[in-house]
Each structure stands twice: as C-alpha cells, then as structure tokens.
Image (spheres, rainbow, N blue to C red):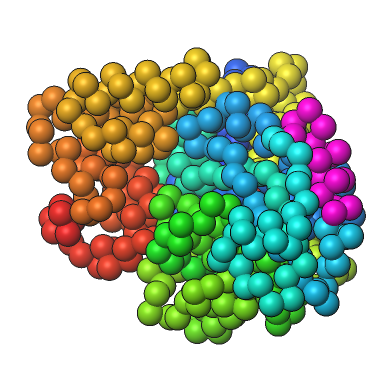
Amino acid sequence: MKRHVKPLGEGAFDLLILGGGITGAGVALDAVLRGMKVALIDKGDFASGTSSVSSKLVHGGLRYLEHAAFHLVYEALHERRLLLRNAPHLVYPLKFAIPFYEGSRVPPWKWRAGLTLYDFLAGRSNLRRNRVLSERDAARAFPWLKTVGLHGGAVYFDAQMDDARLCLDVLQTAARCGACVINYAEALAFEQQNGRIAGVRVLDHLSGEEFSVRARQVLNATGPWVDTVCRLAGDDSGPHLRPTKGVHLVVPDRGLTAAFLLLHPADGRVFFVIPWMGKTLIGTTDTLYDDRPETLAVTAEDTEYLLAGHNHHLQPALAAKDILGSFAGLRPLIRTERNEPSSLSREFRVFWSPSGLLSVAGGKYTTYRRMAETVTDMIARRLGRRRPGQTKGKRLDGAPEACWEEFLRNETASLCAKHRLEGRVVVHLLQRYGRRAADVAAYLKGNRALARPIIPGEPDILAEFVYHREEEMAVFPADYLLRRTRLGLFHPEMLQKPFATWEGS
Ligand SMILES: Cc1cc2nc3c(=O)[nH]c(=O)nc-3n(C[C@H](O)[C@H](O)[C@H](O)COP(=O)(O)OP(=O)(O)OC[C@H]3O[C@@H](n4cnc5c(N)ncnc54)[C@H](O)[C@@H]3O)c2cc1C
C-alpha cells in the first residue's frame, strides 16, 4: 500500500470516502469488491480516531442484553464468527470470567440467564458454552479475585483483536483490490453542481497542496467528526451524535488466564480487566463528552475511577505508579432520548443530507462488515450497481488460506530456520502480519541489524519499521508506535524521543 496522491486528482471516482477508521475502511473494501472506483482519505493517520483506542473486543456484548438489544447482540455474535475466519491472525478467542458477589447490582440468576441467552443467540457461531462455577472453583481458578462476598462465578468465551492492525489490514486489502487510500489528506470543503455534491476540496497535509477530488457519491465516515463534516456540507440538521468518552489504563502483565467482566463499585457499570499483548488493559469509562474530539485527554478522575474498580475486585492492588500508559477514545454514538451514557444505543444510523452527502454514524467495531454492507447497498442502489456484497467470505490479505493453527505451526518453523529468528519473535510477526510476516522478515536479508528488538524485552523488531514505511504509509512517530506497532501504549516515553534514538531504547 503506497501513498500515491496524484490519482486522487485525476478522473472521477464512483465513491469518495471521508475517514479511514474501521467504518470507512469496511465500506472501501465492500465497494471496491463490487467493482466501484473507490477513493478514501483520512485527515490524519488511518485508525488514528476511535479505531485504535477501543477495548479490542470482538464480542456480542453481554451487557447489551440488559438493554434488551437482542438484535445487536445476535448480529455481533455472527460477525464475530466471520472475523475469526476472515482475519484469524488478528482476531482470536478469549476466555472471560464473571465473579458473582453478594448484594451485587446483577444477581447470579440474572448472569446465568444472560449467559444462557448469549449462548442461544450465538447458535452455531458459539465458541464454547458458558460454565457456572461454585465459590470454591471460582476462587481456585482465579486467584486474583478477592473472596470476601464471592458467591461463585461463570466463564464464557468471546474474542479479542488488535484494533488498529485490523483497520490497516482491511485498508490494505481494499488497496490491493484497487481502492486509492491516502492518509494525511483532509476534506476541507464540498464542491457542488446544481445543488448536489460533485466533489471535495482536499488538503494534502504532507505536501501542503490543495486539490479537488471528483466523485459521484461522497460518504462521511468520520466517526466523532460526523456532525462537523455534515455542517461543512451545509447540513445543520444535527447534531446526530452523542459522543461518550472511554478511557483505558495499561498495566504490566498480571498473568491473568482470562479477562474479567466486573461491576464498578461506584456506579454498578460493567468494566473489564483484559490480558492483551503481554500487558493488561483496564477499562473502560463511559462519560458524556461534548467538547471537540481534538481536546480529549485522560484525567486524574478517569484514572482513579479505573484503579478503584480494579482494586475493589482484584488483588494485589494497583497504584498510579504501576500504570504504563493510558488512552482515551470517543464513541461516536447516535443521539437518542436516553441520556445515560452506558444505555446509549450501539446501533448505527445512515442518513442523507439535502446535498446528497451520505453519512454513517454509530455502531461497533465488531459489526463493521455488516454496517459497511448496508451502507454500500445504499450507494450501489443510488449508482445503479447491482452486484451484491462480497465481504462475508472475503479473507483479509494477511489471512492464510490454510487453517490458522496449521499455518502458524508451519510458518513458524520455516521463518525461524530461514531468518535465524527466535520462535517468539516469529509468532509475534505471524500474529500481527499473517501471511505478510514473510515480507517483513525479507528485509533481514540485506541487513541483519534489522532483527534487533525495538525495545529490549518486547518482540517487535526493527524490520517492522521499514515495512511500515515502505508498505503501510507510516509517516510520523505515532504512526509507527501507536498503530502499526502498539509499543507507544506501553512505553509512552518513546513518543517523545526523536526517530534516530528509537533503536534499542
Ligand atoms: C473506549 C472505547 C471502547 C470500545 N470498545 C469496543 C470494543 O471492544 N468492541 C467493539 O466492537 N467496539 C468498540 N468500540 C467502538 C468502536 O471502536 C467504534 O465504533 C469504531 O472504532 C468507530 O470507527 P469509525 O471509523 O466510525 O470512527 P474513527 O475510527 O474515529 O474514524 C474516523 C476517521 O475520520 C477521520 N476524519 C475526521 N474528519 C475528517 C475530514 N474532514 N477529512 C478526512 N478524514 C477525516 C479521522 O481522522 C478518523 O481517523 C469502542 C469505542 C470506544 C471509544
């Protein structure tokens, strides 16, 4: 995937997508597979909005059953199955534990009923049936749990992912199929003909040049910026969104054998403690946020809330000094009558502006493919295209043709032997790049020094940076550290250091 800006200004596209988060990426892939001429731009890096700061769960969302969102949960559980098949290098099953506590907001019978319904809604897509644990079994299986008031628990299965990498893989797949995707290119204004949008004025932030991109249809897939972009198009009917802020803390590996779904003692909200990439994530908060997305930050209050939640349930307790990093994101949720953040709908909405701009907002990462299919159906109808969606069975570029376990076993042996790499480094490369791990390792042929770790103790190697620059359009330190690798989340001090000093730091 190369950054060729010139084709953007030449000829007319069927579809121009604004926003290179998972929503825009999903539509780009769906539309290009239906034979449309597609362009996608992002004002920053791909996945630099919400799509790199999620909880990294590919899940039905057990907690949405409390709000009777059965359809959403059903759909998400089925999309989970497709993602496990179409991107097995990036999406994998994860065990979850729920402790039952005396006097808790959600009594054990309600958890049991919810889990039975969850299994039922998953149907053939279920990963494994849930299992209820006695008090003794829960305490024995999960020694991190505080046992005062513990009344047993349950385990169930969902899935986990690398969010930013999944977005990049969808974009890379779309680009290989012919989509023109460009980061650091911002939609500044809309160009109209006879009262309808016919193109967009774009600023290339890297060259400083401005140019026009012509398209038969423009899609606004800008997540938390959807209302801003609608206003650019002269549509003041909003706001359509009610964004909420979500914060996660990153702490060292706690040796957890499962993720924990817990209820916060202060307000009874669900939050998670999740093993991820050899570290532990604690999150998330869910608070209304009306300010500009650019001003989003983790506050001392967010940190205290999450530490208090963790320390209420798990031991040993954590203090602020244990935190490696933190990140905040904005959920681009649809505005409804309800005002309670956790009860705001995770459904998505697609709407037309009078000038012909199509906008999509809301939704979840897990259901991005289904959402993209709905949006692309609408665009196809408008453009007179008849080809149906092709993404259900479309494996992403990194996904192997063979069964994942077999691929992992064979490729680990082959790449270790060919490039004299440690097994854990090769497994890391395969889990991040899938089939393309061989392309990353190929950089070692000419320069053995690229086999060195970027940070001692972490499996990421310097060859990855070369691949990011050459094949993934990485430009700035955050592109390499926060989205192509995730090192900046665990070692935020790296983001302050100049490029030249990264190696071995
Ligand atoms: C804390 C948190 C936890 C979450 N956890 C989960 C989870 O575990 N599982 C799950 O399924 N979902 C989860 N979600 C939801 C999911 O992450 C989001 O629904 C999804 O990432 C939204 O993607 P998007 O592409 O719509 O928006 P974004 O990723 O924000 O992308 C929008 C893009 O538009 C670009 N843009 C803005 N203005 C312009 C312009 N003028 N020109 C060009 N580009 C522009 C931005 O730079 C940005 O990259 C979570 C969300 C949050 C906040």
Can residue 371 be seen at all in this image of the molecule? no
Can residue 505 be seen at all in this image of the molecule? yes
Identify the image quadrant of residue 31.
top right
> Which is nearer the eye, 384 or 386?
386
Q: Which residues are magenta?
A: 112-126
In the drawing, does residue 495 fall left or right of residue 43?
left
The stretch drawn in magenta includes residue 502? no
Q: Position of residue 64 (x, y in %)?
A: 80, 56
Q: Residue furthest front?
A: 136
Q: Is residue 287 above or below residue 18?
A: below
The stretch drawn in magenta includes residue 123? yes
**Residue at the location (43% across, 66% down)?**
251
> Which is nearer the eye, 12 or 475?
475
Picture quarter with the C terminus: bottom left
Q: Position of residue 345 (x, y in %)?
A: 79, 58
**Residue at the location (62% across, 78% down)?**
312
Q: Position of residue 53 (x, y in %)?
A: 52, 57
Picture quarter with the N terminus: top left
In the drawing, does residue 294 fall left or right of residue 394?
left
